[in-house]
Amino acid sequence: MPKLIKTKKLGEIADIKSGSTPSRSQHDRYFKDGTIPWVKTMDLNNGFIYKTDELITKVAIEETSCSVLPAGTVLVAMYGGFNQIGRTGLLKVDAAVNQAISAIRLDEKLALPEYILQYLNGKIDYWKKFAASSRKDPNITRNDVCDFPVILPSLEEQKKTAEILATWDEAIALTERAIEAKQSLRTALLGKLLSFEESFQTKIGDISQVKSGSTPLRGNYELYFKDGTIPWIKTMDLNNGFIDKTDELITDAAIRETACSVFPRDTVLVAMYGGFNQIGRTGLLKIDAAVNQAISAIQVDKSVVLPKYLLQYLNAKVDYWKRFAASSRKDPNITRRDVCDFPIEVPSLLEQKKIVDVLETSDDEIGILHQYYACLQRQKRGLMQKLLTGEWRVAVQEAA
């Protein structure tokens, strides 16, 4: 029968302290030609840490409050933005850390670093709720880390639990690398496919009707939105792929009484504004739908350009919009006129179809990997919920 498990606070099983940042004004003395890894919040990867973006010098250790922590130290971010709080790492090399990080040096007769790393990763929401509810600026303190409760089974059970979860971590990491490799291959493929021997260059406006959408007055919600049946697309609905549903629907009255109009399937959409990271986002309608005023709706002449080809071409040229928007206006945006003037290489319809087929096959492969990746993450979350609460216990060899 498994031994009873107990709950301890981190401060009862570890020496916990924060790091420091050497003065940047002494860069040549404290950073230049540094040899000692120095961990910042952004170096934390919720896994093992073998290297850091920055190195500090031995002089920085001697003259500042920085100190070198041994491999096996568990790290947790105390601040640096709401999405950074609770990020973790486990040192696999000796390193110093900055003041935004708590360094947890465990009594390894009571707790294993690999187990505590997994336990902290499984309790990230604890930090989020704590930081959000207790302070104006989201952060946690060293005392909060010291008071963090940990369920501790035997060392052997900790070891096996960490090994089980690490198996999923490895599978997740392998899948991430596979996705990156496929995406790099697709980028290289795209460059070759869009280098044409025979094509002609034109502008989108010369081969399409380009229109903008509209937003019905929200003050007339009952008339224009309630019980709506017509899909209505906002910038955030654009997914750089096919669109077959939307977050919001509008009514027939909105079409009759406002500047909204319904665009047919195979209309290509491109975001004109809504934030710098939204500009140039695209979509291809697989349903009839209306769009808001931040979107250009492109209805192409299908005897010249395939909608799927235009979608892929626009996705390949997203940096065109970024540079254009950044350099030409105070507020990043593009206009309907800019969309009309967008230059496009147009090969034969047959070649367009072949290009689309190749890229869609690549997209399908990447999509399958993303689904597998999400499945692995769900499985790991489920395992963590069971194993780290003691609901499931792993079998271990009991000492005689």
Image: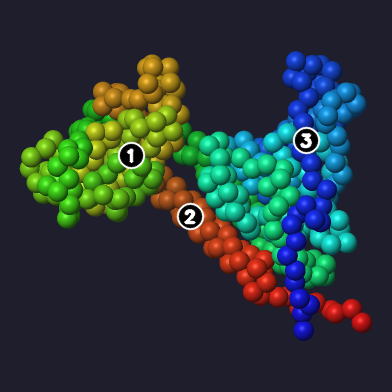
- Say which amino acid is labelled 1: Thr
Q: Quick one: label 2 or label 3, which is nearer the N terminus?
A: 3
State the CA–CA distance, disc 2 to disc 1: 22 Å
**Looking at the image, which residue is at 20% across and 40% down?**
218
Could you say which quadrant of the image residue 159 lies in? Answer: bottom right
Q: Which mark is residue 291?
A: none
Question: What residue would you read off at disc 3?
Answer: 19
On-image quarter of the N terminus: bottom right
- Say which amino acid is labelled 3: Gly
Task: Residue 188 in the image: state x and y as whole percent.
Answer: 55, 39
Q: Quick one: label 2 or label 1, which is nearer the N terminus?
A: 1
Count of numbered circles on the image: 3
State the CA–CA distance, disc 2 to disc 3: 41 Å
Question: What residue would you read off at disc 2?
Answer: 367
Q: Tell me if I can see residue 321 in this picture.
A: yes
* View extreme (bottom): residue: 1
State the CA–CA distance, disc 3 to disc 1: 42 Å
Which of labels 3 and 1 is toward the front? 3
Q: Tell me if I can see residue 185 in this picture.
A: no
Which of labels 2 and 1 is toward the front? 1
Q: Secondary structure at mark 3?
A: loop
Task: Residue 374 in the image: state x and y as whole percent.
Answer: 53, 59
State whether residue 231 is above or below residue 279: below
Question: What residue would you read off at disc 1?
Answer: 235
Q: Are marks 3 and 1 in contact (CB under 8 Å)?
A: no
Q: Secondary structure at mark 2?
A: helix
Task: Residue 284 in the image: state x and y as whole percent.
Answer: 31, 45
Could you say which quadrant of the image residue 84 lies in? Answer: top right
